[in-house]
Structure formats: C-alpha cells, structure tokens
Amino acid sequence: PSLFTAIELAPRDPILGITEAYNADTNPKKVNLGVGVYYDDNGKVPLLECVQRAEALLIATVTPRTYLPIDGLATYDKAVQELVFGAESKVIAEKRVITAQAIGGTGALKLGADFLKRFAPDAQVWISDPSWENHRALFESAGFVVNNYPYYDAATHGVDFESMLASFKTMPAGSIVLLHACCHNPTGADLNADQWSKIIEVVTSRGLVPFLDMAYQGFGEGIETDGQVVRRFAAAGGPLFVSNSFSKSFSLYGERVGALSIVATDSAEAARVLSQLKRIIRTNYSNPPTHGGKVVATVLSNPELRALWETELAAMRVRIRANRELLVDLLKQKAPSHDFAFVKQQCGMFSYSGLSKEQVDQLRNNNAIYAVDTGRICVAALNSSNINYVVDAICQVL
Ligand code: PMP
C-alpha cells in the first residue's frame, strides 16, 4: 500500500458541481441559475471599463514585480479602509483599525479564522442557518466547532428575527458570530436597521466577537448604505473582524482581491494585532499578489475612475433589481395563484426562490435549467433572452 492507498474520494463541491453538469448539457436552451457570479444581459461576466482603464495605466508605467509587503499594498489597504469604514471613520483617525490585503474574501475569512484560533482557541463559531456553504468548512478547517443560529424562515421568506435574537442571548461570552453585512448569501434576506440595532446591542452587552463578511458591498442599496452595518459595529466599540471582497463589485473574481480588517481598542493594540496577523500571512503565502490590488487601488484613488466604477457598479445593482421586478411580474401574470412578491424584498445577487428540491430537479431534467437544490437562484443570471423560458418552466413545476 502507498501513502495514498487509504485516501477516500472527497465529495464534490455542490455549487461548482452544478456548473460542471450545466457545461456537459447539450440542450441549446440551457440556463445556469446556480452560479455565484454576476452575468450581464448577454450572459457574460463583465470586464468593467474602470478596470480596463486602470490596467492601461498600470501597463503604461511598467513596474517591476517585486514582492508586496506582507500585509499588501499600502495604498490598497488604505483605500479599502475608507471604502469599508467610511472616509470620516473614527476608528481610522484613531488608528484602531488595521487592514491586510487578502486572497479574495475567502482568503480574508481564513486569515481571520486562523488569527482567532490562535488567540481565542476555545471559542466556538456561530453562522446563520443557512449560510454561504464555505463558512462552516472554512472555520472547521481552522479548528473551530461551528454552530448555526436560526436565520431564515421559509414560511415568511424572511428572517426569523425573534429566534435569531433569542439564540444570540444564550451564546457564551467570547463566541464568534459570523454575520453577513449585506446581501445575505444564499437567502437574499437581510436584517433591517432596527433589527441590526438589537443585534449590535446583544453582541456588545454579551461580549460576543462579531465577524462581518461583506462580499457584496454596492450590490444591495449602494456602497454607503451597504457599509452602514460595518460602521455601526465599529462605532459600538469592542473587537471587530471584517472580511471584504472585490470579486463581485469589481468583477475581478480570478484576481482574488479582498481584505481583512480588525478593529482594536486602541492604536497600540491594533499595532500588536497587525504584527501577529503578518506572522500568519508570512507562514501561509508570504505576501499577496500584485495585480488585482493595484487595479483596485488605482480605481479607488483616481477620482475619474472611481466615479466610473460607482456608475458601473450601480448599473449592475439596478439590473439585478430590474430582474427581480420582471421575474415577479411575469410569474404573477402566468401563475396568479402563487405569490412571489417576496423576491422583490430580497437583496443582492441571490434569491431563495421557494422552489423545492423536487421542483429544482424537474427544472433541470425537463428544461435544462440549473438551480441549487435549496432553491437558490442567481438573479443576475436571468436576462432578456432566457427570462420568459425560465418563467414558463417554473409555472410548469408549480
Ligand atoms: N463570503 C460570501 C458570503 C460569498 O458569497 C463569497 C463569494 N461567493 C465569499 C465570501 C468569497 O469571496 P471571494 O470569491 O472573493 O473569495
């Protein structure tokens, strides 16, 4: 027997598996609603014009590819802080927040998880039920016990806030609570401002450790509005972890651009935190790659490109919203006895459509329409060429 003889085949990634099946399907009408990326109306992942212009500037300046600092490009880290916490943020002025460039939002979560495992080894982690499918695996692989707190209520297609809050009230002090800062993945159901106040209150009073995952800033209501939850937590004091990603908002998936920010009690503490975070980075991948960070830093710090980015991001946000409206209106016309109005209330790229696993199977087998078993669909994958086909198919399985 070899070292590998006893190794079992690991299960396939459930979401990426859908795309594999979709790619293998020969039906010309096939539609992939299972994806986790933004498609434009032509069914393509856009390359934003602000990104193209920033890349042209970078090519024109011809810079050698030396190593970046361990915590990434300084101009990038600064621009991220101002975007996430607000340019006028007190925690920035007081040097209480540190930010390290990370390998996408996933890399940021993993850095935060490894950091927490070192300094809070006995804490347990709590994620929403359901959550992004990688949250559990990622924190478990960092060595944590991961629990669910109640979140989605299938009956109302919204958040079961009373149960969520009750669960927070029973968590031991020091528990790590992972929250989606906006555009909850997979449900599309977010808390309102009032509910966030109650969560911030209980997190602060019980000494819980909030970890905000913000993968969709600008996809919900807008850059500033979507950032409010982070800013409110930062203002509440106490430790705070924030992972953010530019995969969606810059359509830079493969460049792996994200960041981890940690808010500490004072600047001296923040400096010690950064020094330890750098050790974790150093022993994992030493320092991050240059290109994506430079593109984002260039766009965010150049007023003209920044304005262009905000316009392009707004167009993505508005198109998703329009898709929600159209989907609901068409379903109302064709299946008036079913109420899909809740889809309009949901936020961000995804919708828990309410379709059952059986219905999802039927859509796939009869119509080559691929959705996630849970009924999650990517609203950005709908377009003017496929929406009527999708609506007709849904009406057949209702
Ligand atoms: N968190 C959530 C909630 C996400 O939906 C995603 C990406 N789908 C990530 C983190 C990871 O982002 P990235 O692709 O930048 O690693």
Image: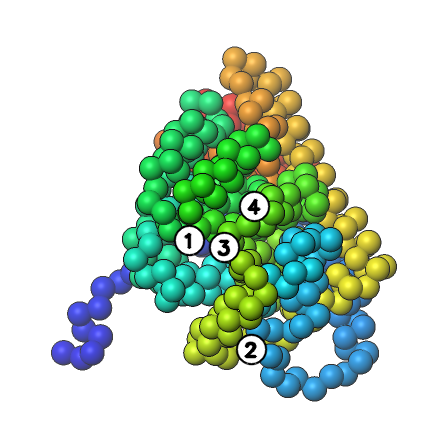
Residue type of the residue flagged with mark 3: Pro
395 or 67, nearer to the observer: 67
Q: Disc 4 beta carbon < 8 A from ligand 1?
A: no
Q: Is residue 193 visible?
A: yes
Residue type of the residue flagged with mark 1: Asn
How far is mark 4 from mark 2, CA to CA? 29 Å
Residue type of the residue flagged with mark 4: Ala
- The local secondary structure at tag 2 comes to loop
Q: Position of residue 273 (x, y in %)?
A: 50, 68
Query: Which is more N-terminal, label 2 or label 3?
Result: 2
**Can you say whether 171 is above or below 153 in the image?**
below
Q: Nearer the viewer, mark 4 or mark 1?
A: 4
Q: Nearer the viewer, mark 3 or mark 1?
A: 3
Q: Nearer the viewer, mark 3 or mark 2?
A: 3
Judging by the rendered image, the residue that carries numbered circle 2 is 70
Q: Disc 2 beta carbon < 8 A from ligand 1?
A: no
Judging by the rendered image, the residue that carries numbered circle 3 is 239
Judging by the rendered image, the residue that carries numbered circle 4 is 236
User: What residue is rendered at 63% in x and 64% in y?
Assistant: 95
Q: Position of residue 212 (x, y in %)?
A: 52, 50
Judging by the rendered image, the residue that carries numbered circle 1 is 134
Q: Disc 1 beta carbon < 8 A from ligand 1?
A: yes
How far is mark 4 from mark 1, CA to CA? 28 Å
Residue 189 horizontal side relative to residue 326, left or right: left
193 or 39, nearer to the observer: 193
State if disc 2 and disc 4 touch (CB < 8 Å): no
User: What residue is rendered at 62% in x and 17% in y?
Assistant: 333
User: What residue is rendered at 43% in x and 78% in y?
Assistant: 283
391 or 192, nearer to the observer: 192
How far is mark 3 from mark 1, CA to CA? 23 Å
Q: Is residue 389 visible?
A: no
